[in-house]
Amino acid sequence: MASRTDLLAWLNDLLQINYTKIEQCGTGGAYCQVLDSIYGDVPMTRVKMNAKHEYEYIANFKVLQNIFKAHKIDKPVLVDKLVKCKMQDNLEFLQWIKRFWDQNYGGQGYDPVARRKGAPTDTPATIAPLSSGNRAGGLTAGNRSGGKTPIGGHRSGSAQPHNEALVLHLQNQVKELSGHLEGLEKERDFYFEKLREIEILVQQQSEVLEAEQKEDATLKLIQAILYSTEDGFEVPDPNSAAADEEETF
């Protein structure tokens, strides 16, 4: 088994990228391009090498699964685990990818940058955590330095650079969290659209079966899951809502 250091060195050299953690492979882009170095037929324009959100990772793994299917590669791709960017899951999969590459790469020349058409490759595995320690430490330091005001009134002047740095730090955090929130909203919309498509298909098939006076237990089960609610939550009765509106003065 290759070590993490060896795997990263091999991956960075092969793809001309600068990964620092195995977890970054959870974005899926690197896996796709490793297979492209073998077969040369991966649609790299559909691979987002700088993916930052889980729905983008899933789209990359969809490309990877299509590659596996096209080349009859009999290997399960545990997408739900890999996209969480956990080290152990991606380490095991990258070790398998490396063995597969060793067995199938023909030694032909490969230009990874040209195949990516210069697309950016920065791929942070997760959003950076809030630096609560620095924030608390900065405020504490400010409070401790304020025991007594020095003669000459230099206290406020010396605190100003610190306050500006703190404000800048907080502004950067707000900007980072805003970007993360935007990604979560896109991810929410992505999964909602998938569920909506499933709901429409189930509805259409149910109507066909109903016209034929038939039933399908699986379709009924899917509908039950789609329309189920959390405990303590009741779907409002539309007739009751209409009645309430009529009585409102």
Image (cartoon, grey):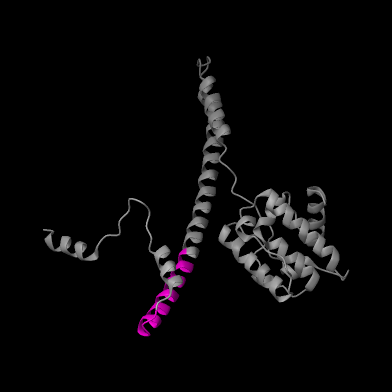
Q: Is residue 153 left or right of residue 39?
A: left
Residue ID at (45%, 64%): 192
**Residues in magenta?**
192-214
Q: Which residue lies furthest to the right in this view?
A: 107
Q: Where is residue 22 in the image (x, y as percent from the top left)?
A: 72, 51
Residue ID at (80%, 53%): 7
Q: What is the quadrant of residue 27 in the picture?
A: bottom right
Residue 57 vs residue 71, the one in the foreground:
71
Residue ID at (73%, 52%): 91
Is residue 130 shown above or below 87? above
Q: Where is residue 123 in the image (x, y as percent from the top left)?
A: 66, 55
Q: What is the quadrant of residue 224 in the picture?
A: bottom left
Q: In this view, does 171 lie to the left or right of 245?
A: right
Q: Which residue lies furthest to the bottom in this view?
A: 212
Query: For the image shown, how many numbered marks are present on the structure?
Result: 0
Residue 197 on the magenta span: yes
User: What quarter of the picture does the C terminus occupy?
Assistant: bottom left
Is residue 232 shown above or below 59? above
Residue 244 vs residue 73, the one in the foreground:
73
Q: Is residue 16 visible?
A: no
Residue ID at (13%, 63%): 246
Q: Where is residue 33 in the image (x, y as percent from the top left)?
A: 74, 66
Q: Can residue 64 be seen in this view?
A: yes
Q: Where is residue 185 in the image (x, y as percent from the top left)?
A: 47, 58
Q: In this view, does 128 lie to the left or right of 9?
A: left
Q: What is the quadrant of residue 67 in the picture?
A: bottom right
Dominant secondary structure, magenta:
helix
